[in-house]
């Protein structure tokens, strides 16, 4: 009997950030090829910033991605500061974390309400969803707005924040502005819980269970945060941020401008679910309560659980933002000066943070004149692409065994898995090795 | 009521212009007034290049596929708007334009490994197709997006801006950080429209709205302060090229600022 191959090709996965397609081909119930093709053009950030002034380069790196430009900005600035030996003040650190939380709230709200919930509720976009369920979109917009406004207040705008500089800020917010943000945060607790509510009640997703190792950054203060200096893995290992290349390696694949990352030579996962799997005990208050209540929805081996993890984080970060603003207000120095960078010697700086989608790593090398000599950026999507391809293979095989063979139906189901990862495709294409 | 058909497309970019468009305060009202035939970031019902009255194109041409898509979009659109710095000026991915070959950039990032898709040196879309209107910014400003869309809805056309950020900065009442502190501010040579957003935050302009057209900036004597403040032609050039590497007037601008001396 001759074998017939069936290709599934999704030219363009919609409702993700950037351009990617899926290519799967199967014979019978055996899947032969699974590729997530990243069509996003290469932008060579690590190469174009070489030979440029450090401050100009730090202004350019966040342009890798709009959804997580604050994440890129904070991580790039931290790496630049590490390279030149600059220690920011405590107030600067807190303001950066607050800005970063603004990014989380905006990114998670947009992803959950506008991009993922249509899947769960059976709509092809947020506009049609909004016609039947206007309150869902309204909640998403309220959350998105506050996330955007926190970033605008601290960063000058919510995409490509220029007010975040090496050594501090151009302009600090006023006490009144911080108070107004605090008041708004306190008023959106219900909206913050709404995504979780809808996700829990419309549980209908493809099963994609499979063992996996999770990697996440150990929060600096033993609570739950995107900043820290050590990475933990669910296999029990911990390693220093500065030495991430000992554990995480990259390879070029022919089907995409995005490189593939491996942890000890194997695919791994990094995302909200990874953070929650490893550091849930650091959460407190309402988010912790809900995470425990809906523990069954937070299966570390099912990527679809990532949306639940994001919903829990949305709740947590609204509360954490309140907390940070209260701490800031208690001891606010509205005239604290930015520490101007003085570059006296060559150096290499590494910074890893948890972007909304997972680990984000920056290495920047600078010479004694403040000129960038090399840069290496690994984005979350690049890290989890091999795991995503594994999940797509597993799920497709599971569907085939259940007798679901219509490529159209399969294509729709597996796109949902891609969206659960919340990939940032335009981010994923800028991976490089540090070269002389 | 007749709803104009609108398409929103992205070539190589950070998707920030689409994100900005998707999150303008009036987006739900806009979605009532126009029919989004294509908006990949928001809708899985999107298709490639349907016939539309207005196409907004974000991103630069950085691959063969981008180029094919752009030609398709142009073929099916009555009005084509270049949306944002990548589309208008080539974007930050053009920073090395003319200085480093795309093959060298590729080798730095990917080594000798083979990749199936073909990269191109990033270029603004006007290098390849006729562009009707330009909406600059990295990302564009919300009020400009609304201005463009409402202009099309009213059957009229958006006016381009041909004056520099400097004028808006004066109106915002900011002290001049270039004159007073010697900050490398590109306000004098950058197209207006942001109301001097960054300088109002005490951050020097990096020129994200692209070089001001027609060499207009030269009439603003502030440009000469770059030289007077001891900023080298090279450092000003590096900064002006972040968003203006493809600007044909750029070297001429520099000649005027630096008196034609290299």
Image (cartoon, coloured by chain):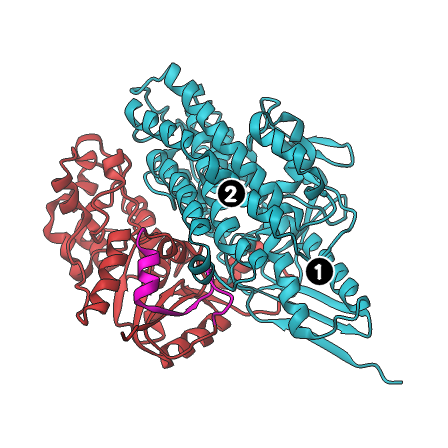
Chain colours: A cyan, B red
Q: Earlier in the sequence, mark 1 or mark 2?
A: 2
Instruction: Say which quadrant the N terminus of chain B sits in.
Output: bottom left
Counting from the top left corner in percent of width and height, residue B131 is at 29, 72
- Horizontal side of A80 relative to B128 (left or right) equals right
Percent across and percent down for residue A435 are 58, 47
- B245 is higher (above) or lower (below) than A95: below
Residue B258 appears anywhere in the view:
no
Above or below for A331 versus B41: above
Q: Is residue B29 magenta?
A: yes
Relative depth, front residue between A65 and B107: A65
The chain letter under disc 2 is A
**A12 to the left or right of A338:** right
Picture mark count: 2
Left of A170 or right of it: where is B72?
right
Quadrant of residue B162 within the rendered picture: bottom left
In the picture of the structure, the residue carrying the numbered disc 2 is A194
């Amino acid at each position: 009997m001759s074998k017939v191959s069936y290709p599934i090709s999704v030219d363009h996965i919609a409702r993700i950030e950037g351009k990617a397609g899926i290519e799967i081909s199967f014979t019978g119930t055996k899947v032969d090829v699974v590729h997530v093709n990243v069509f996003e053009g290469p932008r060579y950030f690590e190469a174009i910033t070489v030979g440029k002034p450090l401050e100009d380069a730090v202004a350019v790196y966040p342009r890798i991605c709009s959804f997580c430009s604050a994440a890129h900005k904070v991580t790039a600035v931290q790496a630049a500061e590490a390279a030149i030996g600059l220690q920011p003040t405590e107030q600067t650190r807190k303001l950066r974390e607050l800005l970063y939380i603004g990014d989380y709230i905006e990114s998670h709200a947009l992803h959950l309400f506008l991009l993922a919930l249509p899947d769960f509720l059976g709509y092809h976009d947020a506009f049609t969803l909004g016609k039947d369920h206007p309150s869902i979109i309204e909640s998403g917009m309220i959350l998105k707005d506050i996330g955007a406004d926190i970033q605008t207040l601290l960063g000058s705008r919510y995409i490509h924040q220029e007010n975040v500089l090496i050594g501090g800020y151009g302009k600090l917010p006023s006490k009144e502005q911080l108070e107004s943000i605090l008041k708004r945060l306190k008023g959106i607790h219900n909206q913050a819980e709404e995504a979780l509510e809808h996700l829990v009640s419309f549980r209908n997703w493809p099963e994609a269970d499979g063992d996996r190792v999770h990697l996440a950054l150990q929060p600096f203060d033993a609570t739950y945060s995107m900043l820290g200096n050590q990475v933990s893995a669910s296999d029990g290992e911990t390693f220093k941020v500065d030495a991430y290349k000992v554990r995480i390696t990259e390879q070029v694949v022919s089907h995409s401008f995005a490189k593939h990352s491996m942890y000890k030579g194997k695919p791994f996962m990094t995302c909200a679910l990874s953070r929650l799997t490893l550091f849930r005990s650091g959460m407190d208050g309402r988010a912790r309560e809900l995470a425990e209540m809906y523990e069954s929805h937070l299966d570390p081996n099912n990527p679809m659980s990532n949306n639940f993890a994001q919903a829990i984080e949305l709740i947590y970060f609204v509360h954490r933002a309140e907390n940070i603003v209260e701490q800031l207000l208690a001891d606010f120095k509205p005239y604290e000066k930015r520490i101007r960078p003085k570059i006296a010697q060559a150096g290499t700086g590494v910074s890893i943070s948890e972007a909304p989608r997972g680990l984000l790593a920056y290495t920047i090398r600078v010479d004694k004149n403040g000129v960038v000599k090399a840069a290496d950026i690994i984005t979350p999507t690049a890290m989890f692409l091999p795991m995503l391809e594994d999940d797509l293979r597993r799920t497709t095989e599971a569907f085939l065994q259940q007798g679901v063979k219509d490529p159209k139906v399969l294509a729709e189901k597996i796109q949902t898995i891609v969206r659960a990862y919340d990939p940032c495709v335009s981010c994923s294409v800028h991976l490089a090795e540090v070269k002389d | 009521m007749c709803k104009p058909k609108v398409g929103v497309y992205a070539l190589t970019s950070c998707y920030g212009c689409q994100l900005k468009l998707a999150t303008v305060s009036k987006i739900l009202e806009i979605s009532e007034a126009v029919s989004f035939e294509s908006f990949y970031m928001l809708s899985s019902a999107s298709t490639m290049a349907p016939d539309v009255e207005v196409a907004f194109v974000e991103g630069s041409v950085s691959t063969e596929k981008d180029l094919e898509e752009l030609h398709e979009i142009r073929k099916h659109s009555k009005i084509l708007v270049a949306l944002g710095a990548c589309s208008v000026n080539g974007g930050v991915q053009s920073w090395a334009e003319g200085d480093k070959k795309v093959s060298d950039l590729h080798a730095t990032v990917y080594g000798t490994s083979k990749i199936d898709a073909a990269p191109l040196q990033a270029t603004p879309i006007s290098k390849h197709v006729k562009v009707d209107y330009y909406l600059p910014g990295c990302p564009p400003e919300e009020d400009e997006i609304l201005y463009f869309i409402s202009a099309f809805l009213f059957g009229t056309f958006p006016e381009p801006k041909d004056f520099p950020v400097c004028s808006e900065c004066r109106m915002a009442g900011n002290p001049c950080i270039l004159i007073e502190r010697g900050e490398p501010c590109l306000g004098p040579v950058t197209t207006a429209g942001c109301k001097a957003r960054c300088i109002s935050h005490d951050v020097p302009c990096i020129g994200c709205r692209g070089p001001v057209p027609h060499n207009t900036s030269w009439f603003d004597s502030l440009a000469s302060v770059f030289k007077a403040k001891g900023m080298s032609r090279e450092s000003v050039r590096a900064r002006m090229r972040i968003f203006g590497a493809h600007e044909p007037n750029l070297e001429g601008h520099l000649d005027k600022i630096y008196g034609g001396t290299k």
